[in-house]
Image: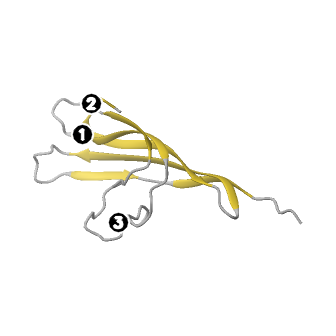
């Protein structure tokens, strides 16, 4: 679902997160294209969107999401929290632009299954 610059989605799909070489076979270091993506709910600004100035010199994009790894043999209630924020300085038509940002994904939670003897 999209509204203006914002997008909300639930489920799983292939994603390209951050500044990455998309021609690599395996994808980026953190998000490989070799496995099924984690199901999640995500609110994002998927494309650079100008902020503060009408001349489009400063633009941002980013996301906030919560995903579910599921349960396995040794853990349960294991989640993924992901935030990302990227800033572009320079107009899209300029030959030189600066990009920067952060993308700290992190698993959270998880409890060991109880053993019954």
Q: Which mark is residue 68?
A: none
Return the residue at label 3. 27
Does dot 3 land on a helix, a strand or a loop? loop
- What is the CA distance from the residue labelled 1 to the residue labelled 3? 28 Å
Q: Quadrant of residue 27?
A: bottom left
Contact between labelled residues 1 and 2, with CB atoms less than 8 Å apart: yes
Residue drawn at point x = 18 percent, y = 45 percent: 90
- Disc 2 vs disc 3: which is toward the camera? 3
- Which numbered disc, 2 or 1, marks the residue that appears first in the sequence? 2
Is label 2 in a helix, a strand or a loop?
Answer: loop
* Foreground: disc 1 or disc 3: 3
Q: Earlier in the sequence, mark 1 or mark 3?
A: 3
Q: Is residue 85 above or below residue 30?
A: above
Residue shown at 10% from the left, 53% from the top: 95
Name of the residue lying farthest toward the front? 117
> Which residue is rendered at x = 33% and y = 55% of the image?
16
The span from disc 2 to disc 3 (Cα, nearest Å) is 33 Å
Secondary structure under the numbered disc 1 in the rendered image? strand
The residue beneath circle 1 is 58
Badge 3 crowding class, 10 Å Cα cut-off, few under 14, some 14 to 19, many 20 or more, is: some
Q: Is residue 95 left or right of residue 43?
A: left
Q: Does the residue at mark 1 contact the one at mark 3 (Cβ under 8 Å)?
A: no
């Amino acid at each position: 679902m999209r509204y203006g610059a914002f997008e909300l989605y639930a489920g799983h799909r292939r994603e390209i997160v951050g500044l990455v070489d998309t021609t690599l076979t395996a994808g980026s270091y953190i998000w490989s294209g070799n496995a099924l993506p984690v199901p999640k709910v995500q609110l994002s600004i998927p494309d650079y969107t100008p902020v503060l100035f009408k001349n489009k010199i400063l633009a941002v994009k980013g996301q906030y999401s919560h995903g579910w790894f599921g349960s396995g043999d040794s853990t349960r209630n294991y989640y993924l929290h992901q935030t990302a924020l990227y800033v572009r300085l320079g107009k899209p038509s300029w030959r030189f632009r600066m990009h920067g940002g952060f993308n700290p994904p992190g698993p959270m939670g998880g409890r060991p299954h109880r053993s019954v003897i």
